[in-house]
Image (tube, rainbow, N blue to C red):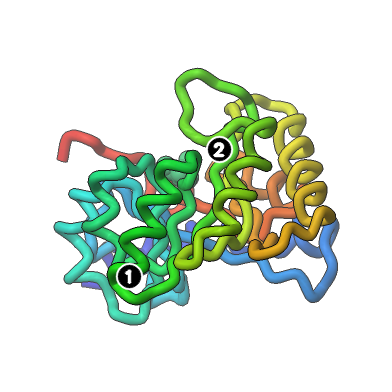
């Protein structure tokens, strides 16, 4: 049945080409840029096909959808949670994902820390920044970010690894540039107890630009799997 998914092979080749082209132009040869396949609404068969082509990282948005698909995913895939997460849902993912990228409040960080401790693990997290200051988006404002980082640095069972963002969908690169500045600014402060190695930025419409602005991890759904059908 693999041939049903041939469009994924083509899409993946194109994406990998675009990433390497942008990286060759704007980045150092030793920079690692990871590609995440964002799986919302996508069948586990299609997801597994992408994994069979070498995509090693999956991004999950919805707890319930992830619960229904996770047992069918290839065991080799690594899963990060990237969607809006209510504190009362952390318990469903604490033992099955390797990173939570969408931490935008002290309250959520505390709950992840509490459950990670209860489960005897350390959870890697990214702080999600609302770089465009959009009402409709979750994530912490750049101004409040430092307090979140300070508080999170004291939590023993979470490890802050970097930042994540969903910039406003504008033509210009202005928010990508601001995010890179913020990321470099935080990293330069060398806050004890946190790491600043991961900048998760770039989706289907802006991943090549995001690579230019220092992204270490691009999250692609539509560009890999095609337009989402929410009515399935
Ligand atoms: C859906 C989603 C993506 C992927 O978006 P596409 O435009 O389909 O590539 C990336 N990040 C997050 C947090 C998402 O929810």
Query: Whole-percent x and y of residue 65?
Result: 20, 50
Q: Nearer the viewer, residue 123 or 96?
A: 123
Query: Whole-percent x and y of residue 89?
Result: 24, 48
Q: Quadrant of the N terminus?
A: bottom left
Q: Residue shown at 60%/58% (left/top)?
A: 153
Residue 25 visible in this rendered orientation of the protein: yes
Q: Residue shown at 43%/75% (left/top)?
A: 53
In the displayed image of the protein, which residue is found farthest to the bottom? 76
Question: Which mark's residue is nearer the viewer, 2 or 1?
Answer: 2
Query: Whole-percent x and y of residue 221?
Result: 43, 49
In the displayed image of the protein, which residue is found farthest to the top? 135
Seen in the picture, residue 173 relative to 128 is either above or below; the reply is: above
Q: Is mark 2 within 8 Å of ligand 1?
A: yes
Q: Which residue is mark 1?
A: 49
Tag 1's secondary structure?
Answer: helix
Q: Nearer the viewer, residue 35 or 70?
A: 70
Please give left or right for residue 154 compared with residue 213 in the image.
left
Asked which quadrant contains residue 171, the reply is: top right
Asked which quadrant contains residue 7, the reply is: bottom left
Q: Which residue is mark 2?
A: 166
């Amino acid at each position: 049945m693999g041939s049903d998914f041939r469009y994924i092979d083509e899409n993946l080749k194109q994406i990998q080409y675009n990433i390497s082209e942008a990286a060759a132009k704007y980045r150092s040869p030793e920079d690692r840029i990871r590609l995440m396949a964002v799986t919302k609404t996508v069948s586990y068969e299609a997801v597994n096909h992408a994994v069979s082509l070498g995509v090693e990282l999956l991004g999950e948005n919805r707890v319930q959808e992830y619960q229904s698909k996770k047992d069918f995913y290839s065991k080799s895939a690594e899963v990060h949670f990237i969607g809006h997460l209510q504190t009362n849902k952390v318990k469903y993912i604490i033992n099955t994902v390797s990173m939570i990228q969408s931490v935008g409040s002290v309250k959520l960080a505390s709950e992840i820390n509490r459950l990670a401790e209860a489960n005897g693990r350390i959870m890697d997290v990214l702080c999600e920044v609302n770089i465009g200051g959009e009402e409709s988006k979750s994530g912490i404002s750049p101004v409040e970010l430092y307090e979140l980082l300070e508080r999170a640095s004291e939590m023993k069972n979470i490890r802050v690894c970097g930042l994540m963002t969903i910039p406003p969908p504008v033509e210009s690169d202005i928010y990508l540039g601001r995010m890179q500045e913020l990321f470099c600014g935080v990293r330069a402060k060398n806050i004890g107890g946190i790491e600043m190695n991961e900048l998760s930025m770039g989706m289907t419409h802006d991943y090549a630009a995001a690579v230019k602005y220092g992204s270490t991890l691009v999250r692609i759904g539509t560009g890999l799997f095609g337009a989402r059908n929410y009515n399935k």
